[in-house]
Image: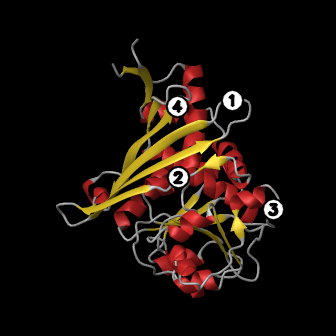
Amino acid sequence: MAEQLLFLDREAVLASLAHVDVCEEVTQVLRRHAEGRVELPAEGYLPWANGEGAYCRSLAMLGAVEADGGPTLRGMKLINAATSNPSHGRERAAGLIMLFDPDTARPNVLAEAGWLSATRTAAYTMVSLRHLGPEQWDATTFLGCGMLARVHVGLLAAAFPRMTRVHLYDTEPRRAEELAGWIHERHPHFTVRVAPGARSAVAAAQVVVTTTTADRGYLPAAWLAPGTFVAHVSLSDLLPDAFLAAQGVFVDDVDLVADNPRRILGQLMREGRITALSGTLGQVLIGERPPIRPTASHVISNPFGMAVLDVGLLGAVHEAAVRLGLGQKLTLY
């Protein structure tokens, strides 16, 4: 008997995502995580330096999500990155996500991971903003102007129609200008400004999203005005005092963040400098922890990036692809 899997390239992923409420899918998986209805094995991590001396890494992340009224979704994301890729016109990260057949354990769905993973991350930011962001805001700052920022902008336009101003900063001005041009073309109702520096960009908005590849911190608490919400999506932009002075700090999974040696928050937790977090976003969603919105100080959302979110989102994308007749059947043997 021939064994096949369905392959979804980026075009098929994008077409399928247009028929998926990604924020709702992420919300449901976060709820299941808080209820103990997921499995999250430790990630595999392989680092190296390429011929240019640039940092490279491969992440293998497995996860399982209980599905209401159906079989448990099980799968894996393999996402690789090289910090030198953007300088050569390539996206920093790329890879594959797969789902496993519940009976044979064979991979039965394989999808391009770059856009799907970025969409998962951006959807997490949208959900956190809905529950932890400022009561009223109309401007967002992006530090780092690659694909991840672009995906965030697209979801912001749909999720927060009152948000009208976007401020951009990137250590490579060309990337900021390219993103500004893309926003002008795709979302002309946004007013876009490229900031001359990171500090002025942070000061320009109550919502700050870090989508950089920074490996050391540069953003202190003093830059964050009272009432600011920070989606600390990348690894190391915030300095320790930003966490220590925060009104609230929320994560997606406490153990994953604490055990990760590459995240500044994890270092602070292991050193005992932060002994209690405000909770996980999932706990807020199920009413187990109270939401904290920024008022007297700032609030930080610091997700690890759980594989179960990728698995859950691919499950919804797969269903849409089947309905729409998208993707290619690949014969394994």
Q: Residue at x 39, y 14 (%)?
A: 2
Q: Earlier in the sequence, mark 2 or mark 3?
A: 2
Could you tell me which secondary element the residue under label 3 belongs to?
A: loop
Element assignment for label 4: helix
Picture quadrant of residue 288: bottom right
Which quadrant of the figure contains the C terminus?
A: top left
Nearer the observer: mark 1 or 2; the answer is: 2
Q: Which of the two labelled residues, at mark 2 and mark 4, occupies the earlier sequence position?
A: 4
The residue tagged 4 is 15
Q: Which residue is mark 1?
A: 70
Q: Position of residue 209 (x, y in %)?
A: 56, 66
In-front residue for pair 263/115:
263
Neighbours of disc 2 within 10 Å: few (<14), some (14-19), many (20+): few
Q: Which residue is mark 3?
A: 288
CA gap, disc 1 to disc 4?
A: 24 Å
Q: Earlier in the sequence, mark 3 or mark 1?
A: 1
Q: Could you tell me the amino acid type at mark 2?
A: Pro
- Disc number lying in front (1 or 4): 1
Residue linked to disc 2: 41
Figure quadrant of the N terminus: top left
Q: Name the residue rendered at 48%, 55% in the picture.
A: 148
Instruction: Name the residue nearer the viewer: 219 or 309.
Output: 309
Instruction: Name the residue at the left extreme.
Output: 51
